[in-house]
């Protein structure tokens, strides 16, 4: 039996335990930077396998090393999974439904963590078949600025030993289960949060001349800021500015003193990102001032754009073709969604691929970040062994 066949077979054999990990994590979700129990569970499972976890990395992150014993090698590759959940109340009627009101694994991080635990087990069991080191990274805080990846990098996760590459896996409810998606080059956008507070002068709605209406001024600002995209960004550079929150707490006959807005700015170019943020701040302040109001601008800096190293991506795509077959490996388009895995991609060669989890026959079609998101757990027969095979292939270069 070849190594890839052995990994594939064992991935099927440990499927029940990986599903059990996933269901435990799904039922006990924790929000970003609060993954205390999740980290303890991960560390406990790693110890039970015979590994030595390091805890408290980047706050609540966990790492471990799997050392190959096939010979001497200084090659190191890293595998990453995220652990945090979202502030969403689960709408699924399943046995493993979240037991924490208002908190749910609605982005598949329970899947990523369970899958990497399975990968860890497979690598440890097959350590005599490879040389070098696989660094396992269980990361907190992917869903909240500034991103747990930045904290883990700060705490030295990409050092001692330093990986030559890093690979990340993420569920994809748009891809059928059994399908794996790849993209070379720029893949996901930077993400910054924009908070505006327009301060005017409230009063009676029937006497607007005595007020400085923040509702009207904020409305002008929202419309004007779209020109930052349409008349400043190159049409060749995908970029988005969207406002999803506009609050002005007056009533039918009362103009309030202020209005607040919250939005997101996305880009795939760091130079344009900096220029765009500056233009947003300048325009919002100046427009408010021109109408007699004040606009306070608060920009919460998020993740950079995510770059999939082309050479690495081609290598792991080839590994995936060997593992699941050419017909089950597809190319995917870029997205203006964001992921803090991007931080790693600006330090070492990185690649972030997609694990298909959709099954229309079973009614599993909901997108991420929704109350009804779920996966076809058959994907967990593939994920652990596939990632283990990718890592072994990387070390064997």
Image (tube, rainbow, N blue to C red):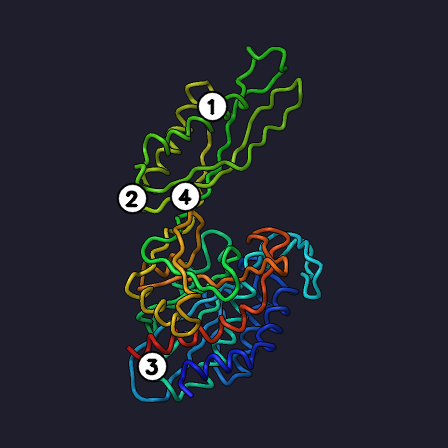
Alpha-carbon span between mark 4 and mark 3: 38 Å
Lower sequence index among marks 1 and 4: 1
Residue 76 in the figure: left or right of residue 26: left
Q: Which residue is mark 3?
A: 132
Q: In the depicted view, which residue is nearer to us: 287 or 175? A: 175
Residue 161 in the figure: left or right of residue 378: left
Q: Which residue is mark 4?
A: 266
Q: Position of residue 240 (x, y in %)?
A: 41, 39
Q: Which residue is mark 1?
A: 220
Alpha-carbon span between mark 1 and mark 4: 21 Å
Lower sequence index among marks 3 and 1: 3
Lower sequence index among marks 2 and 1: 1
Quadrant housing the N terminus: bottom left
Q: Position of residue 316 (x, y in %)?
A: 36, 69
* Secondary element at tag 2: helix
Q: Position of residue 378 (x, y in %)?
A: 57, 69
Q: Position of residue 194 (x, y in %)?
A: 46, 39
Alpha-carbon span between mark 2 and mark 4: 12 Å
* Secondary element at tag 3: loop
Alpha-carbon span between mark 3 and mark 1: 59 Å
Q: Which residue is mark 2?
A: 271
Alpha-carbon span between mark 2 and mark 1: 27 Å
Lower sequence index among marks 2 and 3: 3
| Residue drawn 50% across the image and 26% down it | 218
Lower sequence index among marks 4 and 3: 3
């Amino acid at each position: 039996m070849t190594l890839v066949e052995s990994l594939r077979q064992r991935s099927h054999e440990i499927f029940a335990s990986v599903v059990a990990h996933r269901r435990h994590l799904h039922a006990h979700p924790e929000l970003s930077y609060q993954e205390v129990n999740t980290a303890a569970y991960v560390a406990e499972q790693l110890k039970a396998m015979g590994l030595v976890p390091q805890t408290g990395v980047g706050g609540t992150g966990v790492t471990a090393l799997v050392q190959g014993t096939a010979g001497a090698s200084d090659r190191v590759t890293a595998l990453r999974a995220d652990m945090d959940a979202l502030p969403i109340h689960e709408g699924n009627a399943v046995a493993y439904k979240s037991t924490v009101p208002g908190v749910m694994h609605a982005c598949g991080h329970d899947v990523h963590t369970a899958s990497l635990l399975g990968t860890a087990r497979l690598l440890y069991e097959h350590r005599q078949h490879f040389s070098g080191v696989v660094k396992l990274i269980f990361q907190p805080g992917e869903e909240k600025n500034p991103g747990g990846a930045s904290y883990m990098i700060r705490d030295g996760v990409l050092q001692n030993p330093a990986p030559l590459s890093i690979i990340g896996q993420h569920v994809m409810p748009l891809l059928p289960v059994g399908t794996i998606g790849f993209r070379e080059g720029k893949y996901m956008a930077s993400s910054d949060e924009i908070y505006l507070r327009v301060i005017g002068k409230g009063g009676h709605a029937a006497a607007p001349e005595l007020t400085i209406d923040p509702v009207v001024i904020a409305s002008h600002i929202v419309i004007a800021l779209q020109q930052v995209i349409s008349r400043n960004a190159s049409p060749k550079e995908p970029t988005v500015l969207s406002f999803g929150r506009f609050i002005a707490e007056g009533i039918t006959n009362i103009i309030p003193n202020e209005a607040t807005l919250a939005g997101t700015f996305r880009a795939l170019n760091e130079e344009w990102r900096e220029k765009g943020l500056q233009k947003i701040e300048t325009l919002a302040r100046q427009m408010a001032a021109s109408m007699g109001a004040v606009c306070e601008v608060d920009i919460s800096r998020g993740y950079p754009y995510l770059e999939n190293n082309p050479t690495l991506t081609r290598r792991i795509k080839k590994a995936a073709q060997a593992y699941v077959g050419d017909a089950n490996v597809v190319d995917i388009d870029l997205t203006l969604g964001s992921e803090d895995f991007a931080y790693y991609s600006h330090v070492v060669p990185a690649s972030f691929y997609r694990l298909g989890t959709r099954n229309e026959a079973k009614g599993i079609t909901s997108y991420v970040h929704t109350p009804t998101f779920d996966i076809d757990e058959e994907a967990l027969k593939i994920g652990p062994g596939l990632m283990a095979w990718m890592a072994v292939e990387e070390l064997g270069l």
